[in-house]
Image (tube, helix red, strand yellow):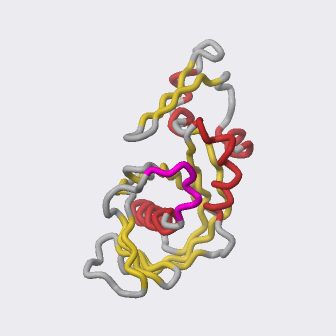
């Protein structure tokens, strides 16, 4: 059985259902840093997660530091849920509407990773994570799908999604919400 972890890759913060930390990442290469808080050992290198914000970039897949930051957010979420550090996950991620169509396939492949399972250590705990699937949605859509009951009686196309971050914001109308989350996941 796999668990679903939603990750919001903001420029200011990386957020999951149970944790949030600044999106910046400091690489220490092969040298162990002075701190254990946010310490990630990944791919033979040391990183400290949560050290400032990420620079603005058009294509997040060009920034190789996103993978270690995601790894830290997955570890945080697993820890917060009280789950074992060896498990299978399905990642649900969002992209701004302005780049969704262009970047979705590349972002999905980037997050899925070719080498499985992903082995790393976060804050002293060994993790072995298999990423089974990645689904990419327009930003804000996942939040809407958790509250479909509030929108059931709305006329078709009368609902709006508004996603506002520190740097990006987007809005769109939604079609009829007579969908199941399963349908949405399979079409992502």
Residue 23 image position (x, y, % from top left): 39, 57
Residue at 63 percent across and 75 percent down: it is 117
Side of 5 relative to 52 (left or right): right
Residue 118 image position (x, y, % from top left): 58, 75
Is residue 60 one of those drawn in magenta? yes
Quarter of the image that includes the C terminus: top right
Side of 22 relative to 61 (left or right): left
Q: Quadrant of residue 89?
A: bottom right
Residue at 40 percent across and 74 percent down: it is 27
Q: What stretch is highlighted in magenta?
A: 56-63
Q: Quadrant of residue 39?
A: bottom left
Q: Which of 96 and 82 is in front in this view?
A: 96
Q: Nearer the viewer, residue 122 or 107?
A: 107
The total number of labels drawn is 0
Residue 44 image position (x, y, % from top left): 49, 85
Is residue 59 one of those drawn in magenta? yes
Q: Which residue appears farthest toward the top when viewing the image?
A: 155
Residue 20 image position (x, y, % from top left): 36, 54
Q: Is 75 drawn above or below residue 117 in the view shown? A: above
Q: In which quarter of the image is residue 14?
A: bottom left
Question: What kind of secondary structure does the magenta stretch mostly adopt?
Answer: loop
Q: Nearer the viewer, residue 34 or 144?
A: 34
Q: Is 155 drawn above or below residue 74 in the view shown? A: above
Q: Nearer the viewer, residue 56 or 91?
A: 56
Side of 38 relative to 143 (left or right): left
Q: Is 7 drawn above or below residue 110 in the view shown? A: above
Quarter of the image that includes the N terminus: bottom right
Residue at 31 percent across and 63 percent down: it is 51
Residue at 44 percent across and 62 percent down: it is 73
């Amino acid at each position: 059985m796999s668990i679903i972890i939603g990750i919001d890759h903001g420029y200011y913060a990386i957020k999951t259902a149970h944790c949030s930390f600044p999106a910046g990442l400091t690489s220490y290469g092969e040298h162990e840093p002075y701190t254990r808080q946010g310490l990630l050992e990944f791919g033979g290198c040391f990183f400290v997660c949560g050290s400032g914000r990420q620079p603005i970039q058009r294509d997040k897949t060009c920034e190789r530091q996103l993978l270690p930051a995601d790894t830290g957010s997955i570890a945080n979420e697993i820890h917060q849920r009280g789950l074992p550090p060896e498990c299978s996950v399905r990642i649900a991620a969002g992209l701004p509407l302005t780049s969704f169509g262009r970047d979705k396939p590349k972002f999905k492949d980037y997050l899925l990773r070719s080498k499985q399972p992903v082995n790393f250590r976060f804050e002293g705990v060994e993790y072995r994570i298999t990423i089974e699937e990645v689904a990419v949605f327009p930003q804000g859509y996942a939040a809407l799908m958790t509250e479909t009951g509030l929108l059931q009686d709305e006329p078709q196309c009368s609902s709006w999604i508004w996603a506002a971050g520190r740097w990006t914001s987007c809005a769109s109308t939604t079609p009829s919400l007579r969908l199941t989350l399963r349908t949405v996941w399979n079409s992502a």
